[in-house]
Image: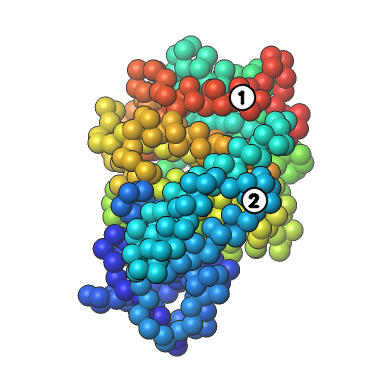
Amino acid sequence: MNQYHLKRQENALDTYVLYNTERIPQKYCGRKTDTEIIFETKLNRAFFLTKLMVPGFGGAYLFADNLGKGYAPDGELLDFCLEAARSRKFHLEAFLKQVQDECKMIPKNSLDRMETAGRFILEGKALESLRELLWAGEELVEFWSRCRIAKRGRRKNFLLGCSTKGFTGSSEKWKELFGSLFNAVCIPTHWGVLEPERGETHYEVLNEMVSWCRTKQMNIRGHAVVWFCSLWEKQNWMGRLSYEEVRRLCLARVEMLMERYGSDFDCIDFNEPMQSNGLNMTFDEHFAIVREAYDVVKRHNPKCRIMINFFNEWQEFYGLDREETLKEHYAVTGLKASEYEWSVTVYDYIDRCLREGMVIDYLGLQWHDHPYDLFGSYQLIRQWYDRYGIPVQITELEVASGTGRPLFTIGRRPNPAPQLYWHEPWSEAVQAEWFEKYLLLAYSMEEVEAFCVFGFCEAPTQWGNYVEGKGIAEWFKVSACAYSCLLDENFRPKASYYILKRMARELGILREKGSDSRETH
């Protein structure tokens, strides 16, 4: 076995993950000593990733990849921060040439930052260099995004969407604010929430959602048509069933959903395969259900698009020790780990879908994991699109507008805002700026076809009152992440709502009355 040695650094949060040179994570947890992390692997060339808090910038996911060549084993102790700075500078220089070719100029401030970063690298000042490189990346990506949009003009079929989780029990004001902004919706079909007890079903709440969205001529995605969550299913009556019972009931449910709403669903998603594996299925067992569900969907509506929807887009959870490193993640969220969870990557899952003849129309990148810097986000989108050539949709955007405990809580929900922030501690101003910059990036990239917010309003109106007293299902009344919605608990629009409204108007996403967002999707 080959060995790689990385210097431990406090602000790296001990989340070092080993990757091959295609940026695919490897299941080799590093062995920690007081001063270093040691990886033992068969890889002859390796990349490394971790999350860093960079003073003067904020948090970021960073790769150390030795200028794209990977590191040879059994070498000297690697200083991750310095190597990450060298690697980021290398990739930014390549992007800078792309910006020059497309835009015919480079912002002077970005060039100055790159030059300063180079001096800091020579002086061994890794964090100072990373600060300058990260800011240069933010500036370059925003400039490039605006330049591309200005040159290309408006896109005719871009989707700006949101989940309808708070629709039931909402006000007319909620509906007016929602309907005047979005041209697409994500309608949740969570099994353990719609069926909180065996024999008790509440699919009637979907009827009004679907009907209202159809009158608004919105593009509709049926969310989590197949999902086995560590909350809603594992900690509910489904969690006590045998695999064969789960398979039979799940497929019957997909049949029912498609009989009722198949003609209304423009797209459905299979959610978090083997990432959230609450019922502890093997890869073969889980895939068998999804493969049959795919056939059911296509039989009812051959035009219905299929999405694989997933979180943790760099897939680092696959390479982390779930018993130690991820212990805090499970404690904070209330999730319960299963033996086969993360036994394969999403890459493995998609590869199998394609091998077995399934047509995957969209890759759904949820984007819960913060903070992604703008250039790192550009790289991440390219990583998935370049591998498969399948259009990307950003599906579950949650960006905090504050910190601390929110007014409405149930159980361990909402999850607290991430400790790693983007530029400054989370606030309404930071949230609004984040949505502006990231919508610009998504809209500028032809690879991205949708930008979907996950939480609209922090008032606990999700699913009405039927979930009260229904155990884990009651947690669903509040948002997943604290302060992540566009409206506060009093239905007051935050700055982010108005930013999205302005941008939707400028980019031509807001539809003229009578137009139909289904026509081009």
The residue shown at (48%, 39%) is: 397
Q: Using the rendered view, name the quadrant where residue 220 is placed.
A: top right
Query: Where residue 29 sits in the image (x, y, percent)?
Result: 38, 72
Answer above or below: position of 2 versus 57.
below
- Between 55 and 238, the one nearer to me in the picture: 55
- Between 496 and 1, the one nearer to me in the picture: 496
Specify the farthest residue to the top: 172
The residue shown at (52%, 39%) is: 438
Secondary structure category for the residue under label 1: helix
Q: Is residue 235 visible?
A: no
Q: Which residue is mark 2?
A: 100
Q: Which three-letter amino acid code belongs to the residue tagged 2?
A: Gln
Query: Where residue 404 sits in the image (x, y, percent)?
Result: 25, 36
Image mark count: 2
Left or right: 394 as drawn, with respect to 466: right
Answer above or below: position of 291 versus 218.
below
Q: Using the rendered view, name the quadrant where residue 478 is placed.
A: top left
- Contact flag, marks 1 and 2 (Cβ < 8 Å): no
Front label number (1 vs 2): 2
Earlier residue among tags 1 and 2? 2
Secondary structure category for the residue under label 2: helix
Q: Quadrant of the N terminus?
A: bottom left
Spatial separation of the CA atoms under disc 1 and disc 2: 25 Å
Q: Which three-letter amino acid code belongs to the residue tagged 1?
A: Glu
Query: Where residue 146 sits in the image (x, y, percent)?
Result: 60, 37
Q: Which mark is residue 485?
A: none
Q: Residues within 10 Å of mark 1 (few under 14, many from 20)?
A: few
The residue shown at (28%, 31%) is: 406
Query: Where residue 192 sits in the image (x, y, percent)?
Result: 45, 40
Q: Which residue is mark 1?
A: 506
